[in-house]
Image: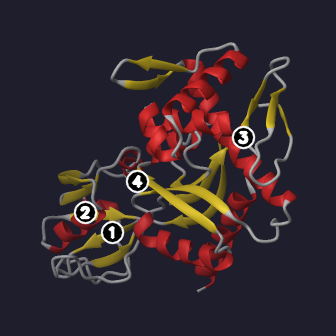
Amino acid sequence: MAAHLGVPEPGRTAAVTMGCVADVNFTLVQLRYFVTAAELGSMTAASRELMVAQSAISAAIAQVERELGVQLLIRHHARGLSLTRSGERFLVEAREFLSHAAALAASARGLAGSLTGELAIGCVTTLAPFYLSRLLREFSVRHPGVRVTVAEGEVSAMESALLDGRCEVALVYAIDLALDLDVQPLTRARPYVLLAPGHPLAGADAVSLADLASEPMILLDLPRSRDYFRTLYAAAAEPRVRFRTSSYETARSLVAGGHGYSILNQRAMTDQTYDGGQVVCVPIRDEVPPLDVVLASVRGVRPTARASAFTETCQEFFTALADD
């Protein structure tokens, strides 16, 4: 989105001139009203959130639409708002524009040396328990003025959050990611076999997947992850799946209970399960591909200083883990 921005003084807004349309002008406040109403799906909800009269928000959005010459929102009587196709695309760019405008204003006020503002990140649910808390703690020590919000979900949900502008960066597995995303490699998670302590192979130095061909498997059944686990059996017989679960801890508990073996990539700090059982981690002897853990962002979008700082924190965090 080409634009020229005049940096506002405290308490004032700046006019925004969109380079793609001649003589189009609206304020950052009007743009913020549109983003809030679009995200909440309601003028009334936006009015409560912004503590501004609903009529002012409605008038501001109408002004933006007139200046752009396109309809951004569809008003449904008593049923809120929905975005037009033009509105969906404009919302993504408007979020980015407001983020950069805030960074520019902070720089103009001499605050660039100390990062402030908000950073929205995403994290895959199966990675969050292992890394998220420590990453947030490390980042907050380095940049206490930045308020971080987190969205959790599966890989596809994190892709959507990035592409529609709800997150700037996301910690994900690199499994068939969208071509519109750039990735920063962080670490590799190698698969291992999870067994009950009483299993005949629990004391082995390593096991082959062929050794488990006749045994029931507990499959961590998540979108894309299930396809990854299938690739592990390229040179072996298909596993005999007995139970499927989307929960990492449920898989561990079922293994501890003797219901089968499982294959996982992340290792807990303890071998005890939530229900008091025990599990044993055994390396896989076969040549099997690891899962790459990456920090993803939208290709071609210039990162904010906050996103760049979070990327740097992630890189140093995972480098330190590898050195331990």
Left or right: 164 with respect to 272?
Answer: right
CA gap, disc 3 and disc 2: 54 Å
Q: Nearer the viewer, residue 184 or 112?
A: 112
Q: Is residue 70 above or below residue 277?
A: above
Q: Nearer the viewer, residue 270 or 241?
A: 270
The residue at which mark 2 appears reads as 212
The image quadrant that residue 33 belongs to is top right
CA gap, disc 2 and disc 4: 13 Å
CA gap, disc 1 and disc 2: 10 Å
Q: Nearer the viewer, mark 3 or mark 4?
A: 3
What residue sits 28% from the left and 84% below the top?
Answer: 203
Mark toward the start of the polypeptide (2 vs 4):
2
Q: Is residue 20 above or below residue 283?
A: above
Q: Nearer the viewer, mark 1 or mark 3?
A: 3
Q: Nearer the viewer, mark 3 or mark 2?
A: 3
The residue at which mark 1 appears reads as 193
CA gap, disc 1 and disc 4: 12 Å
Q: Are marks 1 and 2 in contact (CB under 8 Å)?
A: yes
What residue sits 28% from the left and 54% below the top?
Answer: 246
The residue at which mark 3 appears reads as 97
* Element class at badge 3: helix
- Residue 289, can we see it? no
Provide residue 319's location: percent of width, then percent of height: 65, 76
Q: Amino acid at mark 4?
A: Leu
Q: Amino acid at mark 1?
A: Val
Q: Nearer the viewer, mark 1 or mark 2?
A: 1
* Element class at badge 1: strand
* Element class at badge 4: loop
Q: Amino acid at mark 3?
A: Phe
The image quadrant that residue 67 belongs to is top right
The residue at which mark 4 appears reads as 232
Around disc 2, counting alpha carbons within 10 Å, would you say few (fewer than 14), some (14 to 19), or many (20 or more)? some
